[in-house]
Amino acid sequence: MTHMIDVAEIVAENLDFSSTKSLKTVVYSALKKTILNGEIPAGTRINELFLCNKVSISRTPLRSALHRLHDENLLEYVPGSGMIVKGITSKDAYEIFTIRKSLDRLATITAMHEMNDHDFEEFEQIVSLMQKQGENSEKLASIFTEFNEFIYSKSQLFRLRDTRENIQNYLSYFRELSVHSNDRRANAIEDHVKLYYYMKTKNEKQVELLLDEHLENALDGILSEMDRKVLQAI
């Protein structure tokens, strides 16, 4: 079990007090990022008083953050113990990818028909940069994010973007897991290149088939990586 001082120190590293957001939002974001990154192991108890004293915050914003994370099923309340970290399970991964599949399909098909030649030239630059960074997992994860955000921005479905934002932290966590595998990284780059080509040629059927296959393969790889991390923790 991770000691509470370690938990507090890790959370403190993710606290951004320079943000213009409210303190309760800053605390919530830091805790959520820490949990999603797997920096707080599942089963760890959140000691409110200790954490507040360690990072110099009051219990009000912390409790607000804990309640939000409980509502999002990242924490569970255990009588006599308080809030316990649940973390992300394989069930969570299946649920997130089911949602993502529907959102990505709609955004990609819509963007494909909305984009002009200049947009595709800009899109091609992202793809080219992706291919050049094939061995750099850290930069590649960022470029994958840029690739997806470009599609969502060009779809001009702003409410769809807002909907996706609700699961963005999960997607970031899963993307980080995915790029650690050399084989998965190479296949993901190839899939993104193909997606660019199918979008440019307005091949809607191939776009849908590729998206489904890409996300199913990504999910399989992520589940394997999650299992590996569990075994390492034993």
Image (cartoon, rainbow, N blue to C red):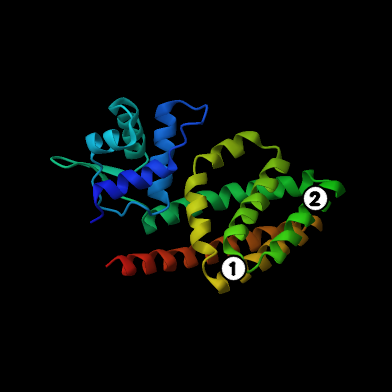
Quarter of the figure that contains the N terminus: bottom left
Quarter of the figure that contains the C terminus: bottom left
Q: How many marks?
A: 2
Above or below, 84 relative to 191: above
Q: Is residue 24 left or right of residue 86?
A: right
Secondary structure at badge 2 equals helix
**Residue 67, picture quadrant:** top left
Return the residue nearer the eye: 93 or 130.
130
**Residue 24, picture quadrant:** top left
**Residue 30 at x, y percent in the picture:** 42, 40
In the rendered image, which residue does mark 1 sit on?
Answer: 185
Residue 74 visible somewhere in the drawing = no
**Residue 82 at x, y percent in the picture:** 20, 39
Residue 122, numbered label: 2
Return the residue nearer the eye: 135 or 230.
135
Q: Amino acid at mark 1?
A: Arg
Query: CA separation, marks 1 and 2?
Result: 22 Å
**Residue drawn 38% across and 59% down?**
90
**Residue 91 at x, y percent in the picture:** 38, 55
At label 1, counting other C-alpha atoms closer than 10 Å, the crowd grade (few under 14, some 14-19, many 20 or more) is many
**Residue drawn 23% across and 34% down?**
49
Residue 49 visible somewhere in the drawing = yes
At label 2, counting other C-alpha atoms closer than 10 Å, the crowd grade (few under 14, some 14-19, many 20 or more) is few
Return the residue nearer the eye: 200 or 32.
32
Secondary structure at badge 1 equals helix
**Residue drawn 77% across and 52% down?**
123
